[in-house]
Each structure stands twice: as structure tokens, then as C-alpha cells.
């Protein structure tokens, strides 16, 4: 069901990456949203990376320092979009 929602693809990938113990962009994004995602009924693993906001930004800087800030903001917008859509579906 997540894939049908905006941003659901990255949320599903992040959930799987967290389950597998991988620290990816998607996993860190899910870790950032973990409290809200749990409230929405998603099974987010208990073990999430410490300071996921900083780790996510660091990964983005490693990939492209000039685009890191805009990519970070874009990813956060995708997370928020997913959370809002999931909240509407689960009402």
C-alpha cells in the first residue's frame, strides 16, 4: 500500500534497508520520520541510526556537495508528503 502514496517508494526502500542494517539515504529518511511513521502504523525497526539528519546530509555531501542542501530539503518534503497522505488514508 505504501507504494501507491507519494514518496511511498523511498519509504518502502528505507524500511527494507533499516531491516537489513544498511545505512542508505532511504533508510536515514525513514529514521528521521520514524516517530510519525510508527504513529501511522508502519513497522519501523527499533534500531535506527543516531542523528539520522546529520548522517543523511553527510551522505548527500559525499555524493555532490553543491546539491546536498537542495536534495536534503527535497527528501524531507517527500517524507512529509508521504506522512500526510498516509494520515489521510488511515483515517
Image (cartoon, rainbow, N blue to C red):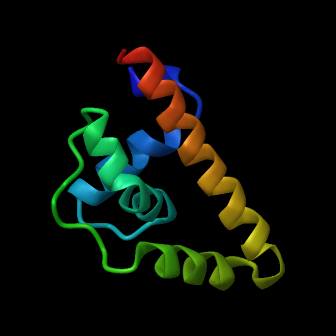
Res 69 → quadrant: bottom right
Horizontal and vertical percent position of residue 71: 72, 63
Relative depth, front residue between 19 and 33: 33
Horizontal and vertical percent position of residue 75: 63, 55
State the quadrant of the N terminus.
top left
Residue found at x 42% / y 27%: 2
For the question of whether residue 8 can be seen, the reply is no
Horizontal and vertical percent position of residue 3: 47, 26
Relative depth, front residue between 72 and 14: 72
Residue furthest out toward the left: 46
Question: Does 65 appear above or below 91?
Answer: below
Residue furthest out toward the front: 91
Q: Is residue 44 left or right of residue 46?
A: right
Q: Is residue 83 left or right of residue 41?
A: right
Horizontal and vertical percent position of residue 5: 52, 24
**How many circles with numbers are drawn on the protein?**
0
Q: Is residue 71 left or right of residue 51?
A: right
Amino acid at each position: 500500500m505504501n507504494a501507491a502514496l507519494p514518496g511511498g517508494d523511498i519509504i518502502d526502500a528505507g524500511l527494507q534497508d533499516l531491516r537489513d542494517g544498511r545505512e542508505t539515504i532511504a533508510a536515514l529518511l525513514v529514521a528521521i520520520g520514524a516517530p510519525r511513521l510508527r504513529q501511522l502504523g508502519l513497522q519501523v525497526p527499533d534500531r535506527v541510526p543516531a542523528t539520522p539528519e546529520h548522517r543523511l546530509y553527510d551522505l548527500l555531501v559525499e555524493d555532490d556537495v553543491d546539491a546536498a542542501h537542495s536534495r536534503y530539503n527535497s527528501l524531507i518534503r517527500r517524507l512529509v508528503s508521504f506522512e500526510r497522505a498516509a494520515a489521510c488514508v488511515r483515517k
